[in-house]
Image: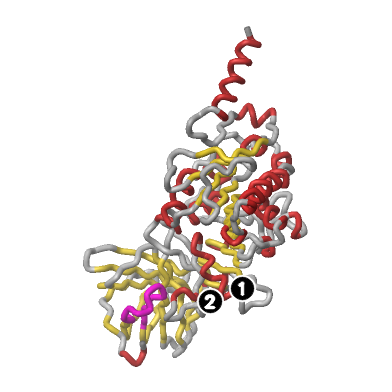
Amino acid sequence: MLKLYLFISLMCLVRSDTDEPCPSFTRLSFHSAVVGTGLNVKLMLYTRKNLTCAQAVSPTDLGSLNVTKKTTFIVHGFRPTGSPPVWIGDLVEGLLFVEDMNVVVVDWNRGATTVIYSHAAGKSKNVAVVLKEFIDQMLANGASLDNIYMIGVSLGAHIAGFVGEMYDGQLGRITGLDPAGPLFNGRPPQDRLDPSDAQFVDVIHSDTDALGYREPLGNIDFYPNGGADQPGCPQTIFGGLQYFKCDHQRSMYLYLSSLRENCTITAYPCDSYRDYRNGKCVSCLTPQKESCPLLGYYADHWKDYLKEKDPPMTKAFFDTAEEKPFCMYHYFVDILTWNKNIRRGDITIKLRDKAGNITESKINHEPATFQKYHQVSLLARFNQDLDKVAAISLMFSTGSIVGPKYKLRILRMKLRSLAHPERPQLCRYDLVLMENVETVFQPILCPKLQM
């Protein structure tokens, strides 16, 4: 009886993988992860004509793939529970929303599903071999390497790199979404993703202190919130499973925001996160906004600027909000003080529009130093973009619990938008901030000579 049950179960699995009218991503159980799975790569093609029903394709059967169009491969990573990635459907839909292309989902869940990470990592080059066979067939039918784009997630980023290396870096583009760090940190370029694997390689690092890769791997490497802990993710183990995977997965959700959300995440080329937070890395902001790199799908707009660099590699930093769509809007707060003595502390600024919407920025990553007749420019980040600011509030704090309360005497405060430099700059003169007391005022337009 047991043998009959196992036979029926096996036949159901085989039927679901081969005979289903709309092939779907392989779904396995945790039991499969415990016993391990042998490698089997399944390729599923989506286009605008079959957005909701995949077509099975293979190195011997390209199906309805149009070789004259861009082809984007989506390659997932380690699957310790056997479940399909929750973001697959959104990514396919988002890509086809922005461009008429072929999207090929690379399902290697049979191989990636195991509780032993090294077993999955060890299969990554074998997955790359299968993908090369498929791309070779595409090329034989008239496709161009320029039109091939690979999006690799975690282990999948290195798989994309292995494919790129097989074509001597002639693939059009590779995007690495938090490339896996364990077993890859410190490895030579041929054993991981690296900038020479495609004509353009962009990478988002969102978990550099745990599951992700620490060092730059691409032509441009994005480090949201410094690349380690992401806002909105659990900070302790009491957050359950999300504590382990939230930071790592954030790279995917940031990429997704570039496809469908009504915000564009701008990043700032910089040597360090600290310099970015201190407002030292906004030189890319010019009347031509495209001079600052954009995160996600449109990151390749930056490749023309990289031609001037040797080597063509850049690190870029930015901050995000805790929730979708993650955008933050940057302003400079210029403060000119006239205190006789030096003051050190943090500034909290709130903006309010006529409709009563309020957005707040706490500039407290490190104390600012205010000196007499010396202007300090602080980079403020807000999660709302208020078109017309009706009121501003400022609060100064030294962070001291005991001791005297200080005053910050301001000759001039100026607020200027980095996202919209064409907007009028707002000023206020002759303010006195009492420590830990919120001071609210209506701004006025700055004189044109200051703009």
The stretch of residues the image draws in magenta is 413-426
Count of marks overlaid on the render: 2
Instruction: Determine the residue positioned at 53% across, 27% down.
Output: 19
Q: Residue furthest bottom?
A: 449
Residue 168 location, quadrant:
bottom right
Residue designated by label 2:
281
**Image position, residue 184 (x, y; %):** 72, 53
Residue at 60% x, 38% y: name it: 42
Residue 64: x and y, percent?
51, 44
129 shown above or below 332: above
Regarding mark 1 in the picture, which secondary structure is present there? loop
Decide if residue 154 is on the left or right side of residue 278.
right
Q: Is residue 190 visible?
A: yes
Residue 63, compared with residue 210, is above or below; it is above
Mark 2 and 1 residues: CB-CB less than 8 Å, in contact? yes
- Residue 255: in magenta span: no
Going by the numbered disc 2, the residue's amino acid type is Cys
Residue 198 found in image quarter: bottom right
Residue under label 1, please give it.
Answer: 271
Identify which amino acid the numbered label 1 is placed on: Asp
In which quadrant of the rendered image does the C terminus lie? Answer: bottom left
- Which residue is situated farthest in the front direction here? 141
Task: Give the side of residue 285 with respect to residue 4, left or right.
Answer: left
Q: Earlier in the sequence, mark 2 or mark 1?
A: 1
- Depth check: give the residue in front, 144 or 358: 144
Q: Is residue 374 above or below residue 105?
A: below
Q: Quadrant of the N terminus?
A: top right
Judging from the image, what secondary structure is the residue with disc 2 in? Answer: loop
Task: Please say whether residue 420 is one of the residues in the magenta stretch.
Answer: yes
> 10 Å neighbourhood of mark 1: few (<14), some, or many (≥20)?
some
- Choose between 124 and 172: the one closer to the eye: 172
Q: How far across and down, in percent of the image, does residue 3 sit?
A: 65, 11
